[in-house]
Image: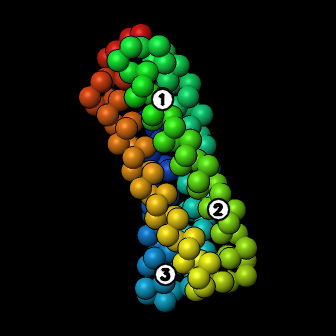
Amino acid sequence: MDTWHPLLVHFPIVLLPLSVGLDLAALVRRQPPWHGVAYGLLCLGALSSAAAVLTGNTAADPYRQHPQLQGLVGAHEDWATSVLLLFFALALARLPLQLQHRLRTRAFGLWLVVALAGCALVWMTGYSGGELVYQHGAGVNIKP
């Protein structure tokens, strides 16, 4: 299962910020149909984040007791879980706005601000995962 994590993790890293960026572009370019595509990407990104967290938890098992990595692994898991929960909540909160075509309202503006903050969480999660792999060799050359 640990070999799946490096493959699956890139989907939420791409899909979630792409979704938010497409929503911003839809507002700026006044292209309401783009919001539907953005919402689809958001849902796919949230689902793929669940897969990344599940496979990541399995991949992290051998490193939980490693003295140099246990803190970094725990922090990465916390960031990833935050991304998962936040974007699932964002997908659910977005649903009524999407269905009622209320995408030029204050509620959507607030949603967008929170989604942009979520993109920062995605970045922190990816950064901490990259640190584990590229600076500490987790999953590459360290055998617990």
Q: Name the residue under label 3.
A: 26
Q: Which of marks 3 and 2 is in front?
A: 2
Q: Which amino acid does label 1 sit on?
A: Gly
Q: Considering the numbered disc 3 on the image, is that residue within a helix, a strand or a loop?
A: helix
Figure quadrant of the N terminus: top right
* Label 1 packing within 10 angstroms: few (<14), some (14-19), many (20+): some
Q: Is residue 57 above or below residue 104?
A: above
The residue at the point 49 percent across, 81 percent down is: 26
Of 62 and 31, the residue lying toward us: 62
Q: Which amino acid does label 2 sit on?
A: Ala
Q: Mark 2 points at which residue?
A: 91
Name which of mark 2 and mark 1 comes first in the sequence: 1
Q: Is residue 112 above or below residue 55?
A: below
Q: Seen in the image, is 114 located left or right of residue 43?
A: left
Is residue 1 among what the camera can see?
A: no
Quadrant position of residue 36: bottom right
Q: Considering the numbered disc 1 on the image, is that residue within a helix, a strand or a loop?
A: helix
Q: Is residue 64 above or below residue 34?
A: above
The residue at the point 58 percent across, 47 percent down is: 84
* Label 3 packing within 10 angstroms: few (<14), some (14-19), many (20+): some
* Label 2 packing within 10 angstroms: few (<14), some (14-19), many (20+): many
Q: Mark 1 points at which residue?
A: 74
CA gap, disc 2 to disc 1? 26 Å
Mark 3 and mark 2 residues within 8 Å of each other at the beta carbon: no
Q: What residue type is labelled 3?
A: Ala
